[in-house]
Image (cartoon, helix red, strand yellow):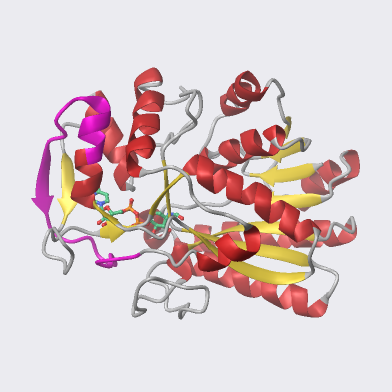
């Protein structure tokens, strides 16, 4: 049985679909602080199976221990955590305590129940800002520009140290680039609470009429059209990478890091134009000032995941925007 912490969230729910499709039994723990249990009904509509669900905060050691006592868990995928970059700057204590406690409590309970396989949801934010592109797994990390990024970086240090102390552990660190899109059914997707921090959900809310225009954070970067370039990856590609990572963890020991991206960069205006094609409407935008902490260009070298995990992203920008638009137009208010 695979335990998915944060499994009712955007990436977590898509991972549940792909795990079930791959034949795994799935149990989800989530405190629903930034997601809806309804996403699991949608997982059932897609796959025919509803994951077992416990409304549990991963920081609650006793409650998490009870879940491990009731279910025979073989491997864990750990998504649960606070993840808004801007919010983390305003609330560093909440981010450090929640995200780091969750990882440490999870590892204590795994150790008590002799569970040895873990896949951790890390992020390209752990890379330092002065690397040349594309980023490889050997690129410099640290000097994170926000507490959220630090919690991912520090989480990685914890897992690496645990693997040194216990050679029987198998931990895979997946560094995501920019997850976007939705399952082709339109039944699950990104459902940010409040004003979206990220580009794609903001654009989709402009398209559906919830926001009247996009603000492009700077068009004077050293990029082809002056706007920020990122490595956007379809969330279903990303979810499928987790199935490969679980299988890898079950057949190896030690700690391994993988970039999960497409290896291709797209600018903010590339996204706007691709989304206009997908939704058949103009996406009004204004050019605003740069956002603090943003880099001009970030994209992945995907060789290691390709050669060792056998992972290669399948979906292009057109498909990412088409699937995002289907989810958004079928669910104008998300899961509400
Ligand atoms: C993408 C581009 C912005 C919003 C962050 C986190 C990362 C991961 C993904 C969690 C940039 C521009 C954005 C807007 C804009 N999250 N933009 N107007 O910053 O690459 O990465 O989200 O793991 O950890 O750091 O993604 O979507 O915020 O920005 O012009 O309203 O879109 O400047 O160039 P980012 P993003």
Compared to residue 166, the image places residue 320 above or below, namely above
Quarter of the figure with the N terminus = top right
Magenta-colored stretch includes residue 291: yes
Q: Is residue 66 or residue 177 the one in the foreground?
A: 177
Compared to residue 30, the image places residue 168 above or below, namely below
Q: Quadrant of ligand 1?
A: bottom left
Q: Residue at x 67, y 47 (%)?
A: 243
57 left or right of 294 in image = right
Q: Which residues are magenta?
A: 274-298
Magenta-colored stretch includes residue 252: no
Give the quarter of the image for residue 181.
Answer: top left
Query: Residue 167: where, in percent of width, then height?
Result: 83, 75
Q: Residue at x 75, y 37 (%)?
A: 27
Compared to residue 23, the image places residue 83 above or below, namely below
Majority secondary structure of magenta residues = loop
321 left or right of 126 in image = left
Camera sees residue 160: yes
Query: Residue 214: where, in percent of width, then height?
Result: 18, 41
Q: Residue at x 28, y 64 (%)?
A: 294
Q: Residue at x 35, y 75 (%)?
A: 129
155 left or right of 278 in image = right
């Amino acid at each position: 049985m695979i335990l998915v912490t944060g499994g009712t969230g955007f990436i977590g729910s898509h991972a549940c679909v792909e795990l079930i499709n791959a034949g795994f039994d799935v149990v989800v723990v989530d405190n629903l602080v930034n997601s809806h249990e309804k996403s699991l009904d949608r997982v059932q509509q897609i796959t025919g199976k509803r994951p077992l669900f416990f409304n549990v905060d991963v920081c609650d050691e006793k409650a998490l221990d009870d879940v491990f006592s009731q279910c025979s868990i073989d491997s864990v995928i750990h998504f649960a955590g606070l993840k808004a970059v801007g919010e983390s700057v305003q609330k560093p204590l909440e981010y450090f305590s929640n995200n780091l406690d969750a990882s440490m409590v999870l590892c204590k309970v795994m150790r008590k129940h002799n569970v040895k396989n873990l896949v951790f949801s890390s992020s390209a934010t752990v890379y330092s800002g002065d690397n040349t592109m594309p980023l490889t797994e050997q690129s410099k990390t640290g000097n994170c520009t926000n507490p959220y990024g630090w919690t991912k970086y520090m989480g990685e240090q914890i897992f690496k140290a645990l693997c040194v102390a216990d050679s029987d552990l198998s931990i895979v660190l997946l560094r995501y680039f920019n997850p976007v899109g939705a399952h082709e059914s339109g039944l699950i997707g990104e459902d940010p609470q409040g004003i979206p921090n990220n580009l794609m959900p903001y654009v989709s809310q402009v398209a559906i009429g919830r926001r009247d225009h996009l603000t492009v954070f700077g068009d004077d970067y050293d990029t082809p059209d002056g706007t920020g370039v990122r490595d956007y990856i379809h969330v279903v590609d990303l979810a499928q990478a987790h199935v490969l990572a679980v299988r890898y963890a079950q057949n190896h020991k030690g700690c391994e890091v993988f970039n999960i991206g497409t290896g291709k960069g797209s600018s903010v205006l590339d996204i706007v134009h691709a989304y206009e094609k997908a939704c058949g409407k103009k996406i009004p935008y204004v050019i605003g000032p740069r956002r603090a902490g943003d880099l001009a260009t970030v994209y992945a070298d995907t060789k290691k995941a390709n050669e060792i995990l056998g992972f290669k992203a399948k979906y292009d920008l057109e498909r990412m925007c088409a699937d995002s638009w289907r989810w958004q137009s079928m669910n104008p208010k998300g899961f509400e």
